[in-house]
Image: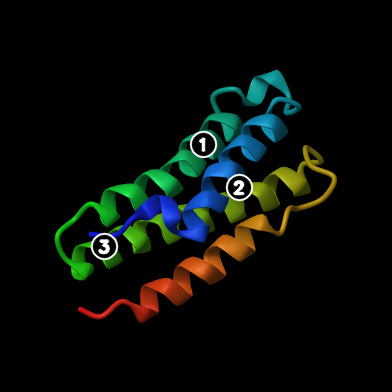
Amino acid sequence: MHQYKDLKFWQLSRAFCTDIYIITKSFPIDEKFGLISQLRRAVVSIPSNIAEGAARSSNKDFKRFLRISLGSCYEIETQLLISFDLGFLEKLNNTLQQIIKMMSKFNSSLKI
């Protein structure tokens, strides 16, 4: 079992949740059940899946949950690009790319 709270990418992904919640407050109200909801659910799933995977008894299981978290990262990236295209965002945050790089590197270092 891993101490997920010590993982830098978990810490960043947790802080990124707050960023997304703040950013989506400025989205149009008619996106409440669209992009806002999608982004918020996806961003919460990143640290949640890291934590759940860390509690598993094998690195194989942990890697599976890290892949799920990475999937959520790419889902968010796509939704942020769409939000940018629609004019809901002025610029894109590079925090997500940092999370993806760190998590990918950690995932590939796990021995199964």
Instruction: State the CA–CA distance, disc 2 to disc 1.
Output: 8 Å
Residue at left 73%, top 53%?
Answer: 93
Amino acid type of the residue tagged 2 in the rendering: Gln
Residue under pointer 2: 79
- The amino acid marked with disc number 3 is Phe
Residue 107's spot in the image, x, y percent?
A: 38, 72
Quadrant location of residue 99? bottom right
Colour scheme shown: rainbow
Residue pointed to by mark 3: 62
On-image quarter of the C terminus: bottom left
Q: Residues within 10 Å of mark 2 (few under 14, many from 20)?
A: some
Left or right: where does residue 92 sit relative to residue 11? right
Tag 3 secondary structure: helix
Residue, disc 1 = 38
Whether 106 is drawn above or below 9: the answer is below
When the figure is inspected, residue 93 is found, relative to residue 28, above or below; the finding is: below
Q: Answer few, some or many: residues within 10 Å of disc 3's Cα (few below 14, many 20 plus, some between 14 and 19).
A: many
Residue 108: percent from the left, percent from the top?
38, 79
- Mark 2 or mark 3, which is nearer to you? 3
Precedes in sequence: disc 2 or disc 1: 1
Quarter of the image where one finds residue 48: top left
Residue visible at 71% across and 59% down in the picture? 94
Q: Secondary structure at mark 2?
A: helix
Image marks 2 and 1: residues in contact by CB distance under 8 Å: yes
Name the foreground residue: 72 vs 16: 16
Q: Position of residue 41 (x, y in %)?
A: 46, 36
Q: Tell me what residue is drawn at x 82 percent, y 50 percent.
A: 91
